[in-house]
Image (cartoon, rainbow, N blue to C red):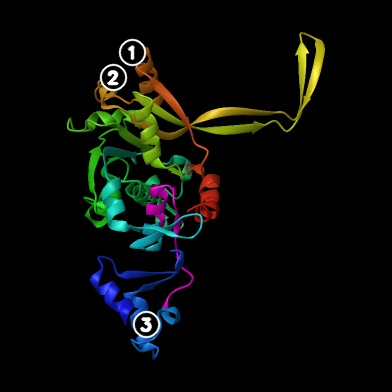
Amino acid sequence: MESLRIIERGAVQIALVVDEQQRLLGTLSDGDIRRAILSGETLEAPVERLMKRKFRFVRCGDDQQVVLEMMRREVLSQIPVLDEKGRVSELLLLHDLLVQSQLDNAVVIMAGGKGTRLRPHTEHCPKPMVHVDGKPILEILLEQCIASGFRQFYLSVNYLKEQIIDHFQDGKRWGVSIEYLLEDEPLGTAGSLQLLPSSVLEPILVLNGDVLTKLNTSQLLRFHVENEAAATLCVREHVVKVPFGVVQAKGVELVGFEEKPSFNHLVNAGVYVVDPQLLHLLPHHQYTDMPTLLQNAQREGHRVLVCPIHEYWIDVGRQETLDEAQSTWVNNK
């Protein structure tokens, strides 16, 4: 079969079947041919009878990080790129995307909290190891960052840290490097950054270990760099609805009414990018939260920006939000 010879000669184990206008009609892999032979076909069978007419593809201009995440999720080693007329533009290879997307920036995931609001789930389990959709939250965060190209991870641990260290070890299972920032005492959402080695020189992605989001973290890093920020804080719009008619008064005089108004606020989303130059602002061995670090940076004249998250986002810190995550995360993967 000519198709088999093409596959054997090529660098990838797939053949693309196109018409005279280069429009993709189907795909044929070595596995397709083997399955066809087992079904009674011969090597002389026409390719039209063996090819897959329902195939996965992406469009020209699709975000490559999104494509990479999809390929990893669906275990695809290659995927064709089609233009608006269905013509083949190129064939994307998983290996090439992984090499292109690798980032030198460190990722710090804050995983040391006790999770008292999630008891009894956290009586014998660290909060970031609580499962959502059958997997620890911390593992979901790790795999999302890997899909975005990050390879160097630091997990800040304290409460029941042995469970986290035993599960992730040095990261080889995921093909990355994982080291641990060991907090003898809780240091807060920023304090443990002082435990990072001096070799960390690029902007640091910092994530709270109880936040799930579909935010593309590599795009966040790009936003931070392009805007020449010293720190970037991700924010989420939070709407507070008053279930009553609000009375407006001046002294004892009635001014007016507002029926069940809504108030919009920007809340801290627990996702940050921090330049290493700010770490000298952290007091040694003292509890420091991220808002304090960012405010100190501003007072020192550093540029601190906010980046809104419009993608799926949830703080899995309470029983009701854990229940919500269990029902909504699977539909937003």
Depth check, mark 3 against mark 2: the one in front is 3
In front: 325, or 166? 325
Q: Which residue is at 54% across, 51% downward?
A: 323
Q: Earlier in the sequence, mark 1 or mark 2?
A: 2
Tell me where the magenta segment starts and ends, as one range: 51-70
Q: CA distance from mark 3 to mark 1?
A: 66 Å
- Does the magenta run of residues contain 273? no
In front: 225, or 41? 41
* Circle 2 SS class: helix
Which image quadrant is residue 47 in? bottom left
The image shows residue 142 at horizontal and vertical percentages of: 34, 48
For residue 26, side relative to residue 1 (left or right): right
Q: Quadrant of the N terminus?
A: bottom left
Contact, mark 1 vs mark 2 (Cβ under 8 Å): yes
User: On the image, numbered disc 3 is attached to which residue?
Assistant: 35
Label 1 crowd (10 A; few <14 / some 14-19 / many >=20): few
User: On the image, numbered disc 1 is attached to which residue?
Assistant: 300
Q: Is residue 21 above or below residue 246?
A: below
In front: 313, or 318? 313
